[in-house]
Amino acid sequence: MEKRLSIWIDDEIERNMPLSQSIIMEKAKGIFNYIQAEASDISETFVASRGWFNRFKHRNNLYNINITREAASGDTKARPNSQRY
């Protein structure tokens, strides 16, 4: 599953597509579900947690890719006057 995810990430980088942690984690869940359905095996489970993501980055040497971070919903209230400038 992780090999397929790595290939997908490489393809997205080549296409200059923005990547975020949540996008990669959702794609990982999708790939896992696809493989599981293909094999007709529902005995295993997969949780794409932040810990898994950090270990995945480490295992695949993904330190040099630019992963965008989503703004927290509270961040928009932190600077209410930012729209004026």
Image (cartoon, rainbow, N blue to C red):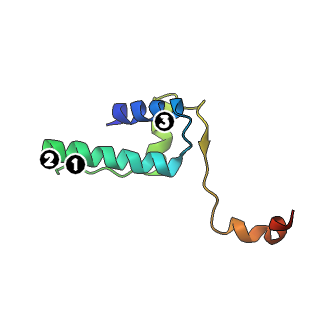
Q: Earlier in the sequence, mark 3 or mark 1?
A: 3
Element class at badge 1: loop
* Tags 3 and 1 touching, CB below 8 Å: no
Against 29, residue 71 (above or below) is below
* Tags 1 and 2 touching, CB below 8 Å: yes
Against 71, residue 18 (above or below) is above
Mark 3: give few (<14), some (14-19) or many (20+) Cα within 10 Å: few
Q: Amino acid at mark 2?
A: Asp
Identify the mark at residue 41; answer none if there is no mark.
Answer: 2
Q: CA distance from mark 3 to mark 1?
A: 28 Å
Q: Residue at x 41, y 35 (%)?
A: 8
Disc 3 target residue: 12
Q: Amino acid at mark 1?
A: Glu
| Residue 24 % position (x, y) | 46, 45
Element class at badge 3: helix
Q: CA distance from mark 2 to mark 3?
A: 29 Å
Element class at badge 2: loop
Kindly report which numbered mark, 3 or 1, lies closer to the viewer in this rendering: 3
Mark 1: give few (<14), some (14-19) or many (20+) Cα within 10 Å: few
Q: Residue at x 84, y 70 (%)?
A: 81
Q: Residue at x 85, y 67 (%)?
A: 84
Q: Residue at x 60, y 55 (%)?
A: 70
